[in-house]
Amino acid sequence: MKLPALKHEKIGRKTMKATYMLKSEGRRISVEVLFKPVKTTRLRVFPDGRVSLTVPTHAPERWVWDVLEQKSAWIARKVALAEQQRTGTAELVRASGIVVILGTPLRIELSHARPKRVWVGNGDGKLYLQSPKAEDSAALERQLDAWWKKTAALYFTQLIKQWYPLLGREEQLPAPQISVKKMRTRWGSCNWQKNKINLNYYLFRATPACVEFVILHELAHLRYPKHDKDFYAFLDRQMPDWKTRKTTLDRDYTTAL
Ligand SMILES: [Zn+2]
């Protein structure tokens, strides 16, 4: 590992700060090292992805590197997790400003104007975010978040309406109610007793083929609550390529959960 030129900066009466660039698993991670009158080291990864290591005032550079190298896999994992936790709309307003909707990357185009509005450009690969508070990133996030949730729900509902008759149930129950929620471990869930389907907020990132697969899977549970033979026979019949869709979904979109 190459040692960068470290700049120590005094940030308190007894505290010096230096930034170490750690390379781990192909990524560069900046670590803020605080030299303080302490006896033990303390390593933390904050929810915003910032990494901080507190070491005794006179800890030698080589020793700091040893600590970091030993912990590098752990740090990389925590940073990646923190990043995933922030995804959703927080990432959208960050510098790169790329958001993926239904499998298509769109660049966010901010404009400072009234009224508050969000729309997808017509084939120009852009998502327009208009706000009278374009400098207020928290407000932009909330705006985008609300739009995302509403738009995803509309899209999902339209698919449910389209696919629901496939269930062919004798007793005509009304189409299920859906709700869109941020979920960490599931793309969707179905409460067949209540005729309700929950869909993951982040599912709106996946391609339409993948979204359809999740919707059909959850709809199927209204008739076949368990993952049994009949359940899979139904999926095979209605969507012969569902396994391919599932593979794509799990491979390309799960990391963003
Ligand atoms: Zn299931």
Image (cartoon, rainbow, N blue to C red):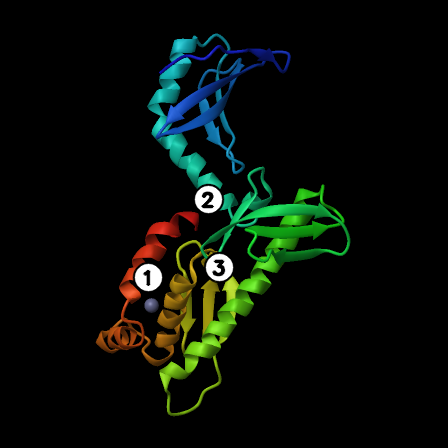
In the current view of this chain or complex, which residue is farthest to the front? 123
Q: Are marks 3 and 1 in contact (CB under 8 Å)?
A: no
For badge 2, the amino acid type reads Gln
**Residue that mark 1 sits on:** 245
Badge 3 local density, few (<14 within 10 Å), some, or many (20+)? many
Q: Nearer the viewer, mark 2 or mark 1?
A: 1
Q: Secondary structure at mark 2?
A: helix
Task: Indicate left or right for 253 with 52 as reference.
Answer: left
Circle 2/circle 1 CB separation < 8 Å: no
Q: Is residue 10 above or below residue 230?
A: above
Q: Is residue 104 in view?
A: yes
Check disc 2 and report the residue beneath it.
84
Q: Residues within 10 Å of mark 1 (few under 14, many from 20)?
A: many
Residue at (38% x, 19% y) in the render: 67
> Ligand 1 shows up in which quadrant of the image?
bottom left
Q: CA distance from mark 3 to mark 2?
A: 16 Å
Q: Would you say 254 lies left or right of 155 here?
A: left
Disc 1 under 8 Å from ligand 1? The reply is: no
Q: Nearer the viewer, residue 33 or 92?
A: 92
